[in-house]
Each structure stands twice: as C-alpha cells, then as structure tokens.
Image: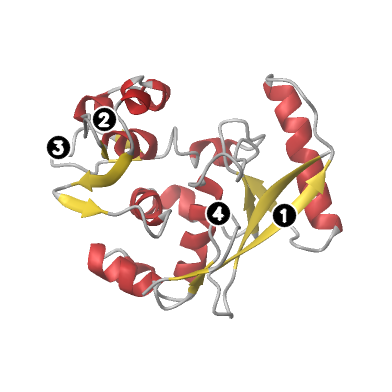
C-alpha cells in the first residue's frame, strides 16, 4: 500500500486547492505499465471515496496524452525575449535557482528537461537561496510560489490544452512524494483551474506583485500537506 495526494480545485471556499491523501495499492517497478497500474489504483481509490469523479494524472507516466503534455517536462512556452524558442516549465525552474555557491545556471534553459533536472551543479552548489527569473527575485517562502508562477504562466500560453480541462475535476502525480518533494505539477494545475473558475486568473498573471496579492486572498494547502499557509 502507498499514500499519495490528490489535488482538487476548490471554487467556493477560502481554500484554492483541496489536498486529500489517498491510500491505494502500489505496484512496484519502474516501467510505465507498472506506474499506470498504480495510477489506476490511486484514481479508483479517490473516486470510490467520492473525492472526485474524473481525475487526471499529470506526469510523463499518464495514460492520457493531455496528462503527458501537461507535465512540467513537456509543457512549454516562449517565456523569454526570443519568441522563436520554447522552454519547458522544468528548464525555466531549474535554470532560475540561485545557490549559496553558484547559479543561476542559465545554460540549463537550453537543455532537455531531464538534463536540467539531473545537472550535478544543482546538488554541489550549497543551499538553495532564492530564484531569479527575468531579473525578478523570488523567495523560498511560500514554498511553491515560484514554481506555481512559472507553471500557470506557461499553461496560459497553451489554450489548446486549457480547453480540454473541463472534463477533469482532480489531478494527481504518481511520481510526487510529499515526504521528498515540495513542488507538484498536479497541484499547480489544480490552482490554475481554481483561479480560472473564480475569475482571478488574469489578475494573478499580470506580474509578480499581482500574483502574490491574488494568491493571498485564499488559504493555500501546500502540495506537501504538513500545514496550511496563509500568505500575507
């Protein structure tokens, strides 16, 4: 058995995203087929407990094409000055990290998502201090604020994906273990849907200040559900 979170967009409470921890049968193994068995078990447990009706796995292991496309490794946009090039959520995120002894490593922007995530400098440059993107500094608190900002902005550039999201009411990432990680693409997607439904998305994405101000209107249940965090 295993426990993983499922993220449910909330449209009428003070919480933007509701996080539920689901216990389900885990199928060990690294193959996609084993991962998808675990995904199916997770989704069945969530629907059987009436947490949702139509969950979507958001990762490269998703059985649905749209779930793969929405993964941080694949979701891309022209977020820099050159409109001819696209960058993924993952490469932007990793290339914006500033450490105690190095960074940001801008060359990671031009690598594959996997290469960027696995770059050894990310583990040998000391403690993470902050993020620097487009000359703007983002702190480490609230924990997922920068990752969410990047994900939501790039998703907004992909209207063909957005129009197909209405059929899903919850999101998972089978690779996300809240005991080991903080940021989660499934959580960010649920946050996008919540803000969109509430009519807050455009305001949130105006700029850094507006994003933080908009998010502060609600209570955030972090992807790592150890506590609730009120942004101020």
Residue 73 falls left or right of residue 122: right
Q: Are the residues at dot 2 and dot 3 in contact (C-beta closer than 8 Å)? A: no
Label 4 to label 2, Cα distance in Å?
25 Å
Residue that badge 4 annotates = 223
Mark earlier in primary sequence (1, 2):
1
Q: Nearer the viewer, residue 150 or 166?
A: 150
- Residue 221, position in %: x, y? 55, 64
Q: Are the residues at dot 1 and dot 2 in contact (C-beta closer than 8 Å)? A: no
Badge 2 crowding class, 10 Å Cα cut-off, few under 14, some 14 to 19, many 20 or more, is: many
The correct choice, above or below, for 3 with respect to 123 in the image is: below
- Residue 109 is tagged as 2
- Residue 105 is tagged as none
**What SS does tag 4 mark?**
loop
- Residue 21 is tagged as 1
Label 4 to label 3, Cα distance in Å?
32 Å
Residue in the picture at 40% in, 54% down: 148
Residue that badge 3 annotates = 82
**What SS does tag 3 mark?**
loop
Mark earlier in primary sequence (4, 2):
2
Label 1 to label 2, Cα distance in Å?
34 Å
């Amino acid at each position: 058995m295993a426990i993983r979170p499922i993220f449910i967009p909330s449209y009428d409470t003070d919480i933007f995203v509701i996080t539920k921890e689901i216990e389900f049968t885990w199928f060990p193994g690294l193959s996609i087929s084993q991962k998808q068995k675990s995904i199916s078990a997770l989704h069945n447990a969530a629907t059987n407990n009436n947490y949702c009706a139509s969950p979507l796995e958001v990762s490269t292991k998703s059985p649905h094409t749209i779930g793969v496309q929405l993964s941080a490794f694949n979701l891309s946009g022209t977020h820099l000055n050159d409109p001819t090039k696209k960058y993924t959520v993952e490469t932007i995120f990793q290339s914006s990290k500033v450490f105690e002894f190095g960074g940001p490593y801008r060359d990671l922007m031009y690598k594959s998502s996997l290469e960027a995530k696995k770059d050894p400098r990310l583990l040998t440059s000391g403690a993470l201090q902050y993020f620097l993107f487009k000359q703007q500094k983002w702190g480490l608190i609230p924990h997922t604020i920068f990752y969410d900002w990047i994900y939501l902005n790039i998703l907004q550039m992909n209207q063909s994906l957005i129009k197909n999201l209405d059929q899903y009411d919850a999101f998972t990432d089978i690779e996300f273990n809240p005991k080991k990680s903080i940021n989660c693409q499934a959580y960010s997607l649920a946050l996008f849907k919540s803000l969109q439904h509430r009519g807050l998305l455009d305001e949130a994405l105006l700029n850094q200040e507006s994003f933080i101000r908009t998010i502060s209107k609600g209570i955030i249940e972090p992807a790592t559900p150890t506590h609730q965090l009120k942004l101020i």
